[in-house]
Image (cartoon, rainbow, N blue to C red):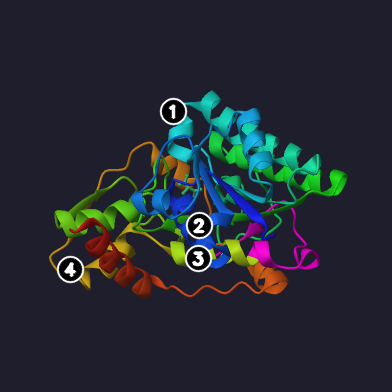
Amino acid sequence: MASKILIIGACGQIGTELTMALRAKRGNENVIACDIREGNKELMASGPFEIADATNYHQIEDLVIQYEIDEVYLMAAMLSATAEKFPMKGWALNMDSLFHVLNLAKEGKVNKVFWPSSIAVFGPTTPKHDTPQTTIMEPSTVYGISKQAGERWCEYYHKKYGVDVRSIRYPGLISYKTLPGGGTTDYAVEIYHEALKNGKYTSFLKEDTELPMMFMDDAIRATISLMDAPSDKVKIRSSYNLSALNFTPKTLAEAIQKHIPEFEISYDPDFRQAIADSWPSSIDDSRAREDWGWKHEFDLEKMTSGMLEGIKEVHHV
Ligand code: AKB
């Protein structure tokens, strides 16, 4: 019997594309999507979908048993900007859901877990450029604190109970199929939509704020290849640094202007500037490259063409 996958938070920015990629690879019936709300038509129509709350242990356990789940991808989370507004809700969602899944694995009800961490685990005292895999980590956001604590718990469950948990510290993810929500790096998605719709965009980050970013196709490929890697190649069980490109709002605007010369950008930084200022501007991901062969494919130009084409096609702008 083919092994079954459960994706929790399947209707979000990453979950939607991950579900479709795994359905293409492993068979539609073998990838069960669940979320607290329904998702896009393609996702809902292409395979099993269940409504479930990631913070409710029994709902998740029931799905694991009903579908005889082998692997869980836990993609439900409250991102950095929203979690600053709702700290306790953010902490509860990000931590409770992780414990539920780790405990199901500890009890032998699932065999493998993917959990996303983030560049938000780093903080103002972390080296900003080429941030190493192992370094000072004093996150100053609720989201970052939850991701850092989550990383420690993943490693603990692996060492103490043998749980096969794998994780990536995602940079800002750029995609066109499903909009992100509540993140600090979301400007880099909004800008493309606004460039096509209105020819202008006001960035909530300053022009020179450099952050690590990645096109979604690369992030999905990285996620699946980490999960497919032989267990002995996965040497880091907290979370892997992962990198593709770094840019500022200004350099991103210039890349868009190559396609839309009349595009205009202005700047009006808000509370998200302080979050961005606490994060690295570039990441050293040599461990992911050495351990399981990570290699990114999309640079700024390739990503920009992909985004503009994709938005026109999917959103009919
Ligand atoms: C956010 O901006 O909160 C996320 C992240 C970097 O984890 N995109």
Disc 2 under 8 Å from ligand 1? The reply is: no
Q: Secondary structure at mark 1?
A: helix
- At x 66% / y 41%, what residue is drawn? 64
Q: Which residues are magenta?
A: 226-245
| Residue position marked by numbered label 1 in the rendering | 85
| Residue position marked by numbered label 3 in the rendering | 24
Alpha-carbon neighbours of circle 2 within 10 Å: few (<14), some, or many (≥20)?
Answer: many
Q: Secondary structure at mark 4?
A: loop
**CB-based contact (under 8 Å), mark 2 and mark 4:** no
What's the amino acid at mark 3? Answer: Ala
| Residue position marked by numbered label 4 in the rendering | 260
Label 1 or label 3, whichever comes before in sequence order:
3
Q: Residue 265 falls in which quadrant of the image?
A: bottom left
**CB-based contact (under 8 Å), mark 4 and mark 3:** no
**CB-based contact (under 8 Å), mark 4 and mark 1:** no
Residue 261 visible at all: yes
Percent of width and height locating residue 156: 80, 43
What's the amino acid at mark 2? Answer: Leu
Percent of width and height locating residue 275: 46, 42
Label 2 or label 4, whichever comes before in sequence order:
2
Label 1 or label 2, whichever comes before in sequence order:
2
The residues bearing labels 4 and 1 have C-alpha atoms spaced at a distance of 35 Å
Alpha-carbon neighbours of circle 4 within 10 Å: few (<14), some, or many (≥20)?
Answer: some
In the drawing, does residue 22 fall left or right of residue 205?
right
Disc number for residue 18: 2
Question: Of discs 1 and 2, which sits in the foreground?
Answer: 2
In the drawing, does residue 11 fall left or right of residue 253?
right
Alpha-carbon neighbours of circle 1 within 10 Å: few (<14), some, or many (≥20)?
Answer: few
The residues bearing labels 2 and 4 have C-alpha atoms spaced at a distance of 30 Å
The residues bearing labels 1 and 2 have C-alpha atoms spaced at a distance of 28 Å
Disc number for residue 161: none
